[in-house]
Every structure is written in C-alpha cells, then in structure tokens.
Image: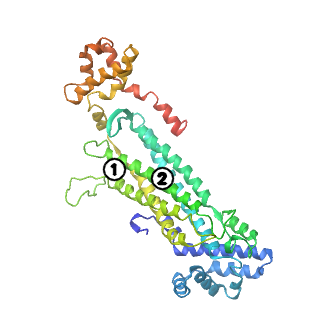
Amino acid sequence: MTIARYSRPEMTAIWSPETKFRIWFEIEAHAADAMAELGTIPKEAAKKIWEKGNAAKFDVARIDEIEAEVKHDVIAFLTHLSEIVGPEARFMHAGMTSSDVLDTCFNVQLVRAADILIADVDNLLVALKRRAIEHKLTATVGRSHGIHAEPTTFGLKLAYAYAEFSRARERLVAARKEVATCAISGAVGTFAQVDPRVEAHVAKAMGLAVEPVSTQIIPRDRHAMYFATLGVIASSIERLATEIRHLQRTEVLEAEEFFSEKQKGSSAMPHKRNPVLSENVTGLARMVRAYALPAMENVALWHERDISHSSVERMIGPDATVTLDFALARLASIIDKLIVYPAAMQKNLDRLGGLIHSQRILIALTQKGVSREDAYRLVQRNAMKVWSGESDFLSLLKADKDVSAKLSDKELEANFNLDHHFKHVDTIFKRAFGAT
C-alpha cells in the first residue's frame, strides 16, 4: 500500500475515502436527476438528494461501522446517505447495481490520476529539453555493452530521453481515454431496470463516455492497458535513472546528482556522494511494473461479473498511480539539478588513446581501395596494441606501413576530428524538439 515517504498529496487525495464517497454520491445524484427527468422518481426527491448530500460531510467511520455489520461497502454508504437525505433516499440507486457506482468511480479516479501523471511528464519534458539544449554540443563518449564506442553529446543523451517521454505522454493520453467510460446498466448490464439515458446523463456529467457493452462491469481490458502503460513509463524512468547511476560511478563521474550542503551520503563513510535518488526511482519503477500483471489477470472474469478483480484494484489503483507520480516528480528534479562535468567527459573520450575513431579509419581505408576485410584487419591489429598499452592509436597507424601506404599523416589526423561526429546534431534536435 502507498506510504507517505513515496507519496504526494494531490495524487493521494484522489484515493482517499472522502474523495471516493464524494464521487459515489455524485454518481447517485446525477443518476437521480436523470431518473427524475424521465419520470421514474419524483423531481423533488432528486432535488433533496442533491441538497442534503452536497451539504453533508460523509462520516467515514460511520460508513465503516455499517459495513462491519452488512459486509457490503456500497450498501453501507447508501445506508449512511439515507441517514443524511431522509425519506427521499428510497429513490436512490433505483435499478442500479453496485458495480455501476464502483466501476464508474474507479474510472473517474483513474482519469484524475492520469491528468496528474500527464502534468508530471510535462514537467519532466521541460527539464529534459532545457538541459539537452544546454549540453547540445557537450562532447562525451557513447558506450555499447558498457564499452567506449564512438563520440556523442550529452545533449543527445537527454534528447533521446525527451523523445521517449514524449511517447510516454501520448500513451498516457490514450490510456486516459481508454478508462474514461461510465456504466449505469444494472444487473448483468441489460438496462432492464434502468434506462440507458440515465447512463448517458451520468457519463456526461462525470466527463466520461458510455461503456458500449458493460455486462455488469466495465471490461477490464481497459484497465489492463492503463496499468500496462504505467509500467512502460516506469521502464523509461528506470532507463534514464540507470544512465545517471552509471555516469555517477567514481570511475566515470561525468554527471552527478545534486548534493546539498548538509546532505550525508553514508552513516559509515563521510566521503560518500551516492546516486540515491536515481536508485530510489529505479526501485519505484519495479513496483509500478509489478502492478501491470495483476491488472492483466483481472481481464478474465466469470460470466457477466465476479469480484476477483476488486481486491486487486483497491491496491493497484492508488499504489501504481501514487508511486509513478512520485517517481516522475523526483526524476524531473534529478534532471533539473543534475551536475554535469564536461572536463571529465573529455578525459574519458581520450581514455583509449583515440580508439573511438576506429570506424572512420576503417571507412577511409575502404575508400582508398582496400577491401573491408583487409581494412578491418589493419585497423584492429593497431587497436589491439592500444588496448595493450603500447602507444596511442594515431601514432601506431602512422607507423604502420600498410596503413600509411594508403593514408597520409594528414589524412589520418583529419579522421580524428570530433566535429565529424556532431555534424547532424541539429537534425536530431529538430526531430526531437521541433524548430527550437
């Protein structure tokens, strides 16, 4: 269950009992309005339900007390509401079933949660864009398999993340739409006891669409897609956090989380500055992903309904959204305050004595008529000497008669220019950020 350490008030409030009961009341009251317009219940009754319910502060303890006796949460709420409304309460919930209230409320909560998460991603995108532009041409080494590959820029690393979280935002918008449905269709979803126009009225009032076929519940494939989307976003969070954790390693130290003046990194070692925030969101991402599987298992329910999904959703609804909200906000703060060390990046670029330019030499040799196989062999034999610590790459290439027979010293030196690797950075940035 959600804990205060990893929670933010606005998201947590969505899942509070007070919020839930207020949404339940609104569903019942809007349904009463529609029934009154259709002549199913007296208009005065619908008016009284609104007046008394709006003015009331629902007593959570009282509802819990009733539920302890009747063993049914919706009945407990309706009983408490009848204590508030009075005799007109007998017209509430006419033809409706518990799932009409529970499922519609759950979707309202998920929609509100999605709105917060979308805003969270927007804040992260702002931070990523600002830092990417700041370090657009800050040279750093690209790594594949954790090994130095070819030069890139730190701005491109952040642009990659920006593009990824832009897709995350699109997925969140789609997930929000996926669960923004309402069901007021009664037992087994046939509308036998409640007019479909009631559902349409409630849906519009609650900012939802009607569920085309709801059996007695809203189909859980919608929720499976929602929580799967949260899981994918969590994976994107972990990817970026893992990159930062690697870059902060002592042997790398190209970037570092902000370390405040009075912060302490270790109870035992006063010198420590650990990437605790990135490690934290990595762990939180694991939890969010874990909630996707039970959401998918909720899809297969018995016949028109059962409640095997209910206990799952009471946990994963608040837990997944609250946890992802916290992780996104923390990641945005990490990026916003991230300390970047261009000098260390340059030092690491030079660490392998020029080996990061091996592909350029390979291509240059093939352009001089050397077969790719022979060119690869010539470049690799000199590269392996650099790995062994014999000399730097350029010096070895110049001394290699087979290489120098094809490429002059000047031509070799020209292929060690970092600028060559950054000639299309503008193109990539335009793709990621537009014309900015």
Q: Residue at x 39, y 56 (%)?
A: 281
SS at circle 2: helix
Task: Tell me the residue that label 2 is attached to.
Answer: 233
Which mark, residue 257? 1
| Residue furthest top as drawn | 405
Mark 2 or 1: the one toward you: 2
Separation (CA) of disc 2 from disc 1: 21 Å
Residue plotted at (26% across, 58% down) = 264
Residue 409 sits in quarter? top left
Write the residue at 77% across / 80% down. 41
Q: Neighbour class for label 1 at 10 Å: few (<14), some, many (≥20)?
A: many
Say if 338 sits above or below 180 in the image.
Answer: above
Q: Amino acid at mark 2?
A: Ile
Closest to the observer: 335 or 199? 199
Q: Secondary structure at mark 1?
A: loop
Q: Is residue 37 left or right of residue 157?
A: right
